[in-house]
């Protein structure tokens, strides 16, 4: 039995959950997290150079399986990478992922997610 392209594409999407905000989006295994997030119109992870050099998109992977590409050691040490601290622009999911934003702009993300509709700040 052959899978249609639509079914095949859906089967290859992983759910990425941002714990800081409770938001989630889908990501294919051949896309890095920032690319998939922006294609879905989401803005939960801050984005900078998208090449692994600026450190703006630093996250902590809390659960799931993923691959990474080379990233700047000025922003992610080998020990941090081994413990799941990585740059979202260099992460390719291999399963559903749960993550937290920990980079330079983390405060902005957490602040936005805790605003209420009647909030003035």
Image: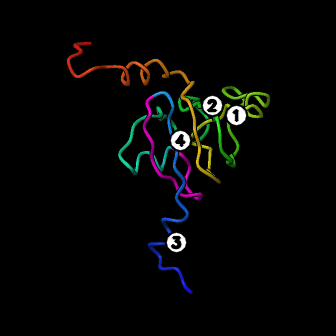
Q: Earlier in the sequence, mark 3 or mark 4?
A: 3
Nearest-to-viewer mark from 1 and 3: 3
- Secondary element at tag 2: strand
Q: Nearer the viewer, residue 15 or 75?
A: 15
The span from disc 1 to disc 3 (Cα, nearest Å) is 29 Å
Q: Which mark is on residue 60?
A: 2
**Residue beneath label 3, please?**
8
Circles 2 and 4 in contact, beta carbons < 8 Å: no
Report which quarter residue 37 is drawn in. Answer: top left
Circles 4 and 1 in contact, beta carbons < 8 Å: no
Q: Earlier in the sequence, mark 1 or mark 3?
A: 3
**Residue beneath label 4, please?**
50
Query: Residue 91: percent from the left, percent from the top?
Result: 62, 45
The reply to whether the magenta stretch includes residue 22 is: yes
Residue plotted at (52% across, 72% down) = 8
Q: Which mark is on residue 32?
A: none
Nearest-to-viewer mark from 4 and 1: 1
Circles 2 and 1 in contact, beta carbons < 8 Å: yes
Q: Is residue 117 above or below residue 49?
A: above
Q: Earlier in the sequence, mark 3 or mark 2?
A: 3
Residue plotted at (62% across, 31% down) = 60
Query: Residue 5: percent from the left, percent from the top?
Result: 47, 76
The reply to whether the magenta stretch includes residue 10 is: no
Within 10 Å of disc 1 (Cα), the crowding (few <14, some 14-19, many 20+) is some
Q: Nearer the viewer, residue 15 or 36?
A: 15
């Amino acid at each position: 039995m052959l899978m249609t392209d639509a079914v095949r594409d859906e089967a290859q999407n992983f759910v990425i959950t941002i714990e800081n905000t409770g938001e989630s989006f889908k990501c294919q295994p051949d896309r890095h997290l920032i690319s998939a997030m922006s294609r879905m119109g989401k803005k939960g992870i801050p984005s900078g150079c998208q090449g692994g050099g600026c450190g703006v998109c630093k996250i902590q992977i809390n659960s799931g399986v993923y691959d990474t590409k080379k990233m700047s050691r000025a922003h992610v040490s080998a020990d941090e990478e081994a413990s799941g601290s990585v740059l979202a622009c260099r992460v390719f999911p291999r399963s559903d992922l749960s993550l937290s934003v920990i980079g330079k702009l983390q405060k902005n993300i957490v602040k936005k997610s805790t605003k209420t509709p009647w909030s003035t700040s």
